């Protein structure tokens, strides 16, 4: 019970810190309104605060103090986001330690959602400098906060032992790879959505859109994130998933709704990468296909549990699952 209380408090604390980080980044972007946008706004060669945010500095800057203030807010927001990720990790560890016996924190939809949001935020923190993702901060934080609120308000479930189907080390391998791919695809989807916004308002000279990277840069970031996530998703859906299914239900493939939608997601992203590689798809068509992929991904992650009454994955619906004595298939 103490571990469960620690987890609940850590979730509340991480949500608070995420909210503070969002406020700081909003203040950063509000402050940027007073800083000029360079002529080559948001290009790869532009000077950024602290990466990916177009701003004129040096001889061309009109207010160096304002630039430094904005730079400080950007770094503070990033540090707060990193702190929130660490606190959320404590919440996940607490959920696992609260069970008897100790287990991985993936026993119900609440715990899956905590893990999914943690991975999205953690990947953002890890890839922040590699892909210069400062421009993505408000969107990522708003997304993580919104999904966390849904988890706490509607999906919360008390800690309970894992069902028989979940008591497998293949679960760990399968879920870890699936949530890593989910995080990469989500960030890639955000990049694709912002690409469509930026491409439509290319000539805008002020506001958030003006300081986004050029459409070509957004398109490239989206592609790299999807190229990273796809082999991980393939490993999760077509290798570890079937192995786990065979161990749990004596069949590698059961045409379960969650399995089918996971495969649909795989097909969409395979088409996305194939079209980019062979047909040279870039820009608007690729971005739309990427958004279709992320829509199928999150519908499979959450929606299937509420729109399907036949899924063998119904243990993820939030309530403790029962296991039949003969089949070992979890039910509501």
Image (cartoon, rainbow, N blue to C red):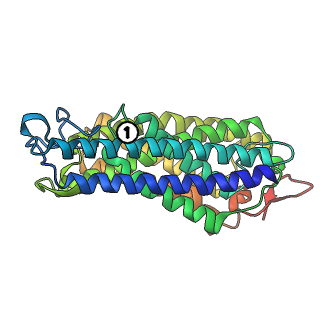
Q: Is residue 33 above or below residue 310?
A: above
Tell me where residue 324 appears, x and y as whole percent: 88, 58
Which residue shows up at 65% across the image and 39% down it? 174
Question: Can residue 296 be seen in this snapshot?
Answer: no
In this view, the residue farthest toward the right is 325
Q: At x 43% / y 44%, what residue is drawn?
A: 269
Q: Position of residue 156 (x, y in %)?
A: 68, 63
Q: Is residue 129 visible?
A: yes
Residue 218 sits above or below residue 291 on the image: above
Residue denoted by label 1: 273
Q: Secondary structure at mark 1?
A: helix
* Residue extending furthest toward the front: 65
Q: Give the residue drawn at x 40%, y 46%.
A: 77
**Along the horizontal axis of the image, is 178 left or right of 31?**
right
Tell me the crowding category of disc 1: few under 14, some 14 to 19, or many 20 or more residues within 10 angstroms, Cα based.
many
Q: From the viewer's perspective, is 154 left or right of 193? A: right
Q: What residue is drawn where x is 53% and y is 60%?
A: 147
Residue 119 percent across, percent down from the top left: 54, 43
């Amino acid at each position: 019970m103490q571990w469960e209380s620690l987890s609940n408090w850590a979730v509340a604390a991480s949500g608070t810190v995420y909210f503070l980080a969002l406020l700081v980044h909003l203040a950063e972007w509000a402050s940027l309104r007073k800083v000029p946008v360079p002529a080559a706004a948001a290009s790869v060669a532009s000077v950024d605060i602290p990466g990916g945010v177009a701003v004129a500095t040096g001889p061309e800057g009109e207010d160096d103090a304002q630039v430094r203030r904005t730079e400080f807010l950007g770094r503070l927001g990033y540090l707060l986001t990193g702190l929130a990720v660490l606190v959320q990790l404590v919440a996940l560890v607490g959920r696992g330690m609260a069970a008897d016996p100790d287990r991985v924190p993936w026993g119900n939809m609440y715990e899956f959602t905590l893990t999914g949001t943690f991975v999205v935020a953690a990947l953002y923190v890890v890839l922040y400098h590699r892909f210069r993702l400062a421009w993505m901060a408000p969107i990522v934080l708003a997304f993580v906060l919104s999904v966390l609120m849904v988890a706490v308000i509607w999906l919360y479930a008390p800690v309970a032992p894992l069902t028989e189907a979940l008591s497998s080390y293949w679960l760990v391998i399968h879920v870890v790879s699936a949530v890593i791919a989910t995080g990469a695809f989500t960030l890639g989807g955000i990049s694709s959505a912002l690409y469509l916004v930026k491409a439509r308002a290319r000539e805008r000279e002020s506001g958030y859109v003006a300081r986004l990277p050029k459409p070509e840069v957004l398109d490239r970031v989206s592609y790299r994130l999807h190229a990273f996530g796809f082999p991980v998703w393939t490993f999760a859906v077509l290798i570890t998933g079937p192995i786990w299914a065979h161990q749990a239900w004596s069949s590698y493939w059961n045409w379960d709704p969650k399995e089918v939608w996971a495969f649909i997601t795989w097909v969409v992203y395979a088409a996305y990468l194939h079209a980019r590689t062979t047909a040279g798809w870039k820009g608007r068509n690729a971005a739309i296909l990427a958004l279709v992929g992320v829509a199928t991904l999150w519908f499979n992650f959450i929606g299937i549990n509420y729109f399907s009454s036949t899924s063998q994955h119904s243990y993820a619906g939030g309530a403790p699952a029962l296991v039949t004595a003969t089949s070992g298939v979890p039910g509501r």
